[in-house]
Amino acid sequence: MNIQKEVLSLLDEILSLNGRSAAFTRDTPLLGAIPELDSMAVVALITGFEERFGFSVDDDDIEGSTFASVGSLIDFVERKVAG
């Protein structure tokens, strides 16, 4: 499974970016830079990650820095998948 591709796909789907995520790199800022990424979208993304990758996220797993960039989000998912 290509985690980066799946994370970008979920970002595009949940934030209704209409394909804009295809141009995202690991350095693309998210939180505060993409208006669509509000608190409700964060919850939807976490739920999407849990469903797509089969892990669970505890409240204390999440920090603002997790959603700082595409790279930090991918790193978070990779750590959770690795267990």
Image (spheres, helix red, strand yellow):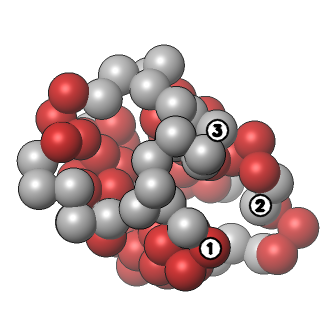
Element type at mark 1: helix
Question: How far apart in space, not on screen, are marks 1 and 3 (Cα)?
Answer: 13 Å
For disc 3, the marked residue is 68
Q: Tell me the crowding category of disc 2: few under 14, some 14 to 19, or many 20 or more residues within 10 angstroms, Cα based.
A: few
Q: Which numbered mark, 1 or 2, is in the foreground of this view?
A: 1
Q: Residue at x 33, y 56 (%)?
A: 11
Q: Relative to 5, does residue 43 appear above or below in the rendering? A: below
Q: Relative to 8, does residue 83 appear above or below in the rendering? A: below
Which residue type does callout 2 highlight? Ile
77 or 68, which is in the foreground? 68
Residue furthest right as drawn: 60
Element type at mark 3: loop
Q: Relative to 4, does residue 63 appear above or below in the rendering? A: below
Query: Quadrant location of residue 83?
Result: bottom right
Sooner in the amino-acid sequence: mark 1 or mark 2:
1
Question: How far apart in space, not on screen, are marks 2 and 3 (Cα)?
Answer: 11 Å
Q: Are marks 2 and 3 in contact (CB under 8 Å)?
A: no
Sooner in the amino-acid sequence: mark 1 or mark 3:
1
Which residue type does callout 3 highlight? Ala
For disc 1, the marked residue is 39
For disc 2, the marked residue is 62
Q: Residue at x 29, y 46 (%)?
A: 8
Which residue type does callout 1 highlight? Ser
Position of residue 68 measured from the top left corner of the image (x, y, whole percent): 64, 38
Q: Quadrant of the N terminus?
A: top left
Residue 76 can be seen in this image: no
